[in-house]
Image (spheres, rainbow, N blue to C red):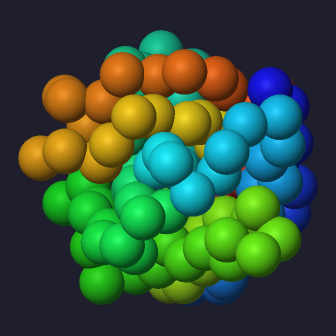
Amino acid sequence: VKIVESGGGLVQAGGSLRLSCAASGFTFDDYAMTWIRQAPGKEREGVSCISSRDGSTNYADSVKGRFTISGDNAKNMVYLQMNNLKPEDTAVYHCATVVSCGSGSDSWNFLAWGQGTQVTVSS
């Protein structure tokens, strides 16, 4: 299994970024894909999830209305469009495979992770 994230960078508050996640080595359609972020000194936070089976999604309250997750099963790709970014969004963003999105991040059973991509939002 291989998961590779890209698209991170430095952006001013209020700006946008689009993260990409390329997955391979497993049957993409059978699982769900998540974005998780880890900031220094903070707990890991599940940001969003999308089911490759039916396209259903869920989001952390902290990003609802600002972030949008999407997927392309034909390309084994997942994206995270991040708008109206805030300094508190600064973190390393990881893409990970889970069995299903379930009811939210507390129910996620991680199967594989990527190395992550740094997102820095300046005030």
Q: Quadrant of residue 108 in the image?
A: top left
Residue at point 54% right, 29% down?
Answer: 38
Q: Is residue 111 among the parts visible in the rendering?
A: yes
Is 16 drawn above or below residue 57 in the view shown?
Answer: below
Q: Left or right of 40: which side holds 48?
A: left
Residue shown at 55% from the left, 77% from the top:
70
Q: Name the residue nearer the viewer: 111 or 13.
A: 111
Total count of labels: 0
Which residue of the protein is positioned furthest toward the left in this rendering? Answer: 103
Left or right: where does residue 78 sit relative to residue 110?
right
Rendering coords of residue 39 (x, y %): 55, 29
- Image quadrant in which the N terminus is located: top right
Looking at the picture, how far across and down is residue 64, in whole percent? 27, 73
Quarter of the figure with residue 13: bottom right
**Quadrant of the frame with the C terminus:** bottom right
Quadrant in the picture for residue 49:
bottom left
The correct choice, above or below, for 100 with respect to 72 in the image is above
Quick check: 111 above or below 117?
A: above
**Can residue 116 be seen in this snapshot?**
no
Compared across the picture, whether 88 is left or right of 27 comes to left
Q: Residue at x 75, y 65 (%)?
A: 77
Relative to 42, does residue 4 appear above or below in the rendering?
below
Q: Residue at x 84, y 43 (%)?
A: 24
Of residues 63 and 3, which is closer to you in this image?
3
Q: Position of residue 100 (x, y in %)?
A: 33, 43
